[in-house]
Image (cartoon, grey):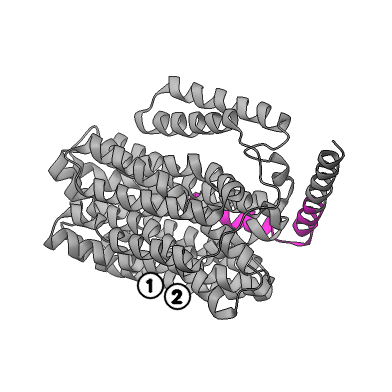
Amino acid sequence: MSELTHRRRLLVLAICCMSLLIVSIDNTILNIALPSIRQELGASVAGMQWTIDAYTLVLASLLILSGSTADRIGRRRVFKAGLVLFTLGSLLCSLAPNLPALVAFRMVQAVGGSMLNPVAMSIITNTFTDPRERARAIGVWGGVVGISMAAGPLVGGVLVDTVGWRSVFWVNLPVGLAALLLTWRYVPESRAPKPRRPDPVGQLLVIALLGSLTYAIIETDLVFAAVAALALTGLLLWEPRRREPLIDLRFFRSAPFSGATVIAVCAFASLGGFLFVNTLYLQDIRGLSALHAGLYMLPMAALTFVCAPLSGRLVGSRGPRLPLLIAGTAMAASGVLFAAFRAETSDPLLFTGYVLFGLGFGFVNAPITNTAVSGMPRAQAGVAAAVASTSRQIGQTLGVAVIGAVLAAGVASTSYAQGFVAASRPAWWVITGCGLCVLAVGGLTSGAWAQGTARRTAERLDEQRGAQTSASASA
């Protein structure tokens, strides 16, 4: 892939970004459609949570497996399979007769989606080998998230108001088919030099951990909380014993990699909660149409779109520290406006909160991805990118689960409309805490000490990999 021309590399980047577009826009569009889904299918707050979390949960559970499988059998092959499954799942979602069927078809989408983002990032990492070019490419990649946030609410609002909520899934069909044809024609096949072995026990423990934890939060079930604790214990005991584990815990000796994981969870938890609360508030409490709700959130989306490429350039020229500090400060300030100053009651404050959150989220995505993959050996790029993507989905899953649970508890003792605003106060403090965590962890894990731990971790991984390769050759 290093012999590709500059134009061909840009084309590969564009094709990979198409996959990110349909995966990202799917969630922003669906958030706008939640009130309509609730009305037509009779969904509760928990039902709306599962509509979002069924997708992000399956995605998070399978991302690492998909990344390692792509390294083993071919990235283009897995990428094409993901496009087929995601497009098929979108079609099935548009035909869902009831809420359980919609949740099940969202899981089909997620299986396909798990084969797209980490594999696409691995393709990009192996296509753009120069660190500065890679940082710019990842900045473009992050900008696509901004495009999806900008287009999602608007396109979703138009479709929901004119055709109905089912049409929000139709957007994925032409983009998915076009990406499939272009991938078949222009994306070269690639594999890791020494692919990792499957780890079925680790994969089952990851699924048990994430599934039981999410169910415990949404349904307030202590039995499933205990199952989650047992699964986590089993994962921590099992993985170090594996020669090629599903999750290589040695990665976390790198402070920037560990920091990127924590930051991804916090940033995307705040995003999931932010979209969930605002969509329900604007449509159910303010009584706005889906389109008007999308227009209200446009300042947030526009700032994300503008700041994501800028963040990529800053990461390439100055490193991840400044973008992370900006991101954490802006996201925390946005949460405080809603939590302490009731920004919902004033349109100027409301839009200020949206602008701040969009600015913060726009700056956070590029340093997460760049830090996760740049400190690792190239042979481990697929797995490292998959861990970063998994952290994002875990964050979004937990954000919707926790904030949805807070809202459900707050409105349980009174009417939905009367209890919503009061119940959202703790939710906004959770979002504020996530922003402060991004700020603190970003500052701690982006300095000289942190870079030293990343360098030493990469050297150890290279040495151990070389020793394993020599031992295998001798045998």
- In front: 301, or 129? 129
Residue 23 numbered mark, or none: none
Is disc 1 surrounded by few (<14), some (14 to 19) or many (20+) residues within 10 Å?
A: many
Q: In what element is the residue under mark 1?
A: helix
Residue 302 numbered mark, or none: 1
Kind of residue at disc 1: Ala
* Residue drawn at the location 45% of the way across and 47% of the way down: 430
In the picture, the quarter occupied by the N terminus is bottom right
* Residue drawn at the location 31% of the way across and 59% of the way down: 172
Please provide percent x and percent y for residue 141.
50, 67
- Residue 456 inside the magenta-drawn segment: yes
- Main SS type for the magenta part? helix
Q: What residue sits right under mark 2 in the picture?
A: 306
In the picture, the quarter occupied by the C terminus is top right
- In front: 157, or 267? 157
Kind of residue at disc 2: Val
Please provide percent x and percent y for residue 259.
64, 52
Above or below for 197 versus 314? above
Please provide percent x and percent y for residue 439.
59, 58
Is disc 2 surrounded by few (<14), some (14 to 19) or many (20+) residues within 10 Å?
A: some
Residue 407: quadrant of the picture = top left
* Residue drawn at the location 52% of the way across and 47% of the way down: 390
**Residue bounds of the magenta highlight:** 432-458
Please provide percent x and percent y for residue 17.
46, 66
| Circles 2, 1 touching at the beta carbon (< 8 Å) | yes
Please indicate whether residue 454 sits to the left or right of residue 25 in the image: right
Q: In what element is the residue under mark 2?
A: helix
